[in-house]
Image (cartoon, rainbow, N blue to C red):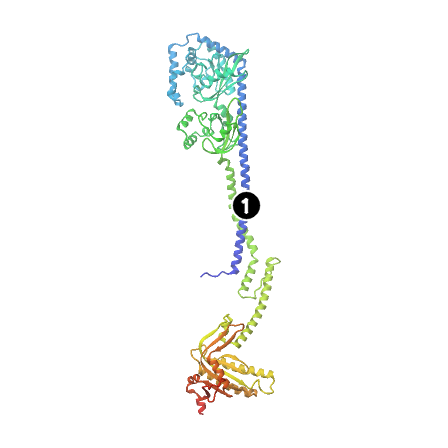
Amino acid sequence: MSRPSDPTTDKPRTLRRSLTVTFTLVSLLSVLLLGVLNYWQTRGLLTESVNDRLVNQQRAKAVAIRNGVDRLEQSVVIAANDQEVIAAVGEFSSAYLELAEAELLDADQSDAVSEFYDSLADAIVEAGVDSDSFVTGDLEPTTDVGRYLQYHYIVQNPSDPEQRNDMVTAAGDDSVYGELHTAWHPALDRLRTQLGLGDLLLIDTIGNVVYSTSKRLDFATNTASGPYRDTGMGDAVTSGIAAAAVGDAVFVDFELYLPAAGKPALFVAAAVRARARTVGTLLVEVPVGALNQLTVGALDWIDTGFGDTAEIYVVGRDQLMRTDSRLWLEDPVEYQRILDDVGAEPLLGDLIETFGSTVLLQEVQTEAVAEALDGEQFLGGGDNYLGRRSLTSAGPVGSDKVDWVVVAEVATSEANAPLRSYLVRILVVGLVLIPIVGLAAMFFADRMTKPVEPVVAAAAAVAGGDLTTTVPDLGRNEFGDVGRRLNLLTSELRAKEKALAAEESEIERLLLSALPTRLVSALREGDRKLLDLVDTATIIAFDIEGIVDVAGMDDQVAVELSADFSAEVESIAERLGVERIRSSTDQHLFASGLDSPDTEIALAVEFTVEVIDAISVFNAEHGVDISYRVGMSAGEVIAGLLAAEQLTYGVFGEPPRTALALAGIAASNQVIVDATTAADLGDEWELDQASDLIDLRGSKVAALVLKGRASQAQT
């Protein structure tokens, strides 16, 4: 069984705890709501900022590429119209034709050229080209001039393939061409360097490559009939220049170009004219690095405002990259791992590693690129070419020379990093605020509930019955008002309790004067149907004469004498344990043996004798002549309270009727008992047979007269 709680201590603690929890929750909820609102606002601002930066970078790079293309076109056209270039084209073309008329290489030298091309087979296969798709001999120059120039400027060039432009004078070439090369090469190579080109080629009117700064395999070949006639270089010279307007340059998109070691190359060609007559073509090769410089910014991403995952790249109409992937440039191993994770073809990774570039190899089939190729500006989220979730901005370059789109993107995780950081800060602030707010809430809750404790304590004391308690003055506030009202209440309760106690005492007195003591307690507990069923008792009925009917006695005096006499008789009954049934001025009804195993006849007789003695004494003391008539009967009775509008106590059955009847027919100062009572008295009492007793119906009554104790009668 649990211990009952003490409201004096439990209630304030419960209120204090509730207030503490409420204050804490309200404070934290405010912080949470403010944090959520700030989060959404910050998220919107951050997304807008990232989108703006992406769009700005994408558009800026598109403008830069467009301007770069325009500048390149202008530079090539200007160079093609430069008098020195015009003179160089004319002189190299003439010298090339002079070489064609001579027997240039002996057999050993010619074999050296063939051996050189044979040695290229392994390198070409390593570059990823299927060995069955080419015959090394098909790449060799088919003209004597071509073999002569490649022998002296390529085969016999002491420099590495990427540094062949370092050779100004070719050993063994004492021809006019050699003299021209020595004279023109430094200036033309400087022009190439200034323009940021990979190679600068001069081509005569019939397609012969009469000069090349870098001395690649396309040097001294023919763009119309040579091994590279079907490449972008061949198209630019044979078809592009013929269709181009005066002052325009021809652009040929990037392609994997074997003479450039298989790396992607973009060609720009412009007609070289002298006096409105085309004397040749200026063809330049633009390396991927030139375009990379415009997009990746020499890998300086911090200055572009991007972080670890952002990048800008260019994609062509074929949905292949035209610039290198940032990740490939920074971490090739990680790039290859991601290709494996996304299930790319193994050959793709091998080719990218072989060529050292993702240009024209990495496919970008994304929604952003598709919309940009359709001429639309794209801004949104999606998976990029490596399967990473990204925010992307894409749009066309906007140049009629190249059909490219520029894509700027950043990983969603990086874009949302500041937002996650903000959330972490909010959580940290929340964790810091929880104990602070909790302590503050406990402090204020304690101060607010402190006045409640005396009020609760006083109320608990009053509830426990202590009406002497008072609440101290708690000030002019709500708690003070409650305290003052509680004090007023206890004062009123004390007054009412005093009045109730007096009323209770009076009720108790009145009940005891009308009912037996054993029934009073049950009645006070609310039982209004109290019956002692089938009990046995001896009923004593007294008829009294000589008090209220005394001639000349004042009524008030008579009433007082009657009350005194009744009190005397009831005192004897209470002392002997005889119950009063009812009393009046001239009749009294008592019972002995109620609530006991037998009729208690001896007690009834003892009570009767003491009452008779008391009458004698009362007569002597008050100068009156009270007489009596007594009837006694024993047997089964029903005694108790009857439920009605008014409570009635009585004894019902044959013995009460018989006793009253015997008292009514008894002579003055005579005690008559019925036969049942007489049979139970035994030899202690002397009885005489009563004669000539007739009841109200005229029938003879069998009864006996109690004369007294047998010993007293003999004496």
320, above or below 111, in the image: below
Q: Which residue is mark 1?
A: 31
Amino acid type shown at disc 1: Val
332 or 7: nearer the eye? 7
Q: How many marks?
A: 1
Judging from the image, what secondary structure is the residue with disc 1 in? Answer: helix
Query: Is residue 23 positioned above or below 52 on the image?
Result: below
569 or 471: nearer the eye? 569
Q: Residue at x 54, y 28 (%)?
A: 59
Within the image, what quadrant is residue 482 found in?
A: bottom right
Q: Label 1: how many residues lie within 10 Å, few (<14), some (14-19) or many (20+)?
A: some
Residue under the point 43% across and 7% down:
102
> Position of 318 compared to 552: left or right?
left
Q: Quadrant of the N terminus?
A: bottom left
Q: Provide residue 438's location: percent of width, then percent of height.
A: 53, 50
Q: Is residue 228 above or below residue 564?
A: above
Q: Position of residue 359 (x, y in %)?
A: 46, 25
- The residue sitting at the front extreme is 698
Residue 444: x and y, percent? Answer: 56, 53
